[in-house]
Amino acid sequence: MDPELVRQRQQLVLTHIVTIARDSRSDSSKLKRFLRRYERSPGELDDIIQDAMLEATRCADRFQARSSVETWFFGIAANVARNHVARCSKRKGQMESLDESPHMMDAESVHRPRDATMDVSQQVEFRQLAGIVDVTLSGLSPDLRYTFDLACLQEESYRDVAEIQSIPVGTVRSRVNRVRTLLRSRLKQGFADYAT
């Protein structure tokens, strides 16, 4: 690729990142509204935004201009937020497991079964199902993945997704339908019950 074109794209990305950073100071900014689906705490939200800004700046040379800079950045911010939530959940789980260690448990909780209703084969099946969904979604283009994430995983209305991504509502419907069709075809191979 032409070095001058790469430099221009980097400059475009950095300019947009500065604008997004300036806009995100407001609690009602589009970015903060978007990220509140992942994290509600204002302090944690600011950390996610800072990390996303750093990651986008670091990856500015990889921007391919297949979508708008804002869409590209929001995809990065969503990934950073998901990773942040996963790390926090893991830490919380570790703290809970420490709380449940034998020297920290009371007499009643020592004799209580962890979860007698949990079927191991069902857990394995759900993990396999989640793996297929994760692999399928990670193979999507950033635009498709972002639209599907907003509309189906974050349960935003199609109109809101269209506004966030600056695309027509019909494009949102089309993208969501394409992803659902792809997921159905992948799930039919081993999880037909879930492919409806």
Image: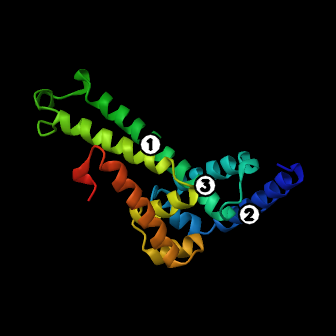
Q: Earlier in the sequence, mark 2 or mark 1?
A: 2
Please identify the quarter of the rendering in which residue 132 is found.
top left
Label 2: which secondary element = helix
Work out how far the residue at label 2 is from the one at label 3, CA to CA, in angstroms.
14 Å
Q: Residue at x 50, y 78 (%)?
A: 169
Look at mark 1 in the image and give the residue it sits on. 86
- The three-letter code of the residue at mark 3 reads Ile
Look at mark 3 in the image and give the residue it sits on. 49
Task: Give the side of residue 53 with respect to residue 135, left or right.
Answer: right
Indicate the quadrant containing the C terminus: top left, top right, bottom left or bottom right: bottom left
Label 3: which secondary element = helix
| Other-residue count near label 1 (Cα within 10 Å), few / some / many at <14 / 14–19 / ≥20 | few
Label 1: which secondary element = helix
Whether label 2 touches label 1, CB < 8 Å: no
- In this view, the mark in front (2 or 3): 2
In percent of width and height, residue 62 lies at 72, 48
Look at mark 2 in the image and give the residue it sits on. 16
Task: Give the side of residue 105 with respect to residue 142, left or right.
Answer: left
Q: Residue at x 11, y 36 (%)?
A: 116
Q: Residue at x 38, y 41 (%)?
A: 131
Task: Give the side of residue 105 with respect to residue 149, left or right.
Answer: left
| Other-residue count near label 2 (Cα within 10 Å), few / some / many at <14 / 14–19 / ≥20 | some
Q: Earlier in the sequence, mark 3 or mark 1?
A: 3
In percent of width and height, residue 101 lies at 26, 24
Q: In the rendered image, is residue 46 in sight?
A: no
- The three-letter code of the residue at mark 1 reads Ala
In percent of width and height, residue 194 lies at 25, 53
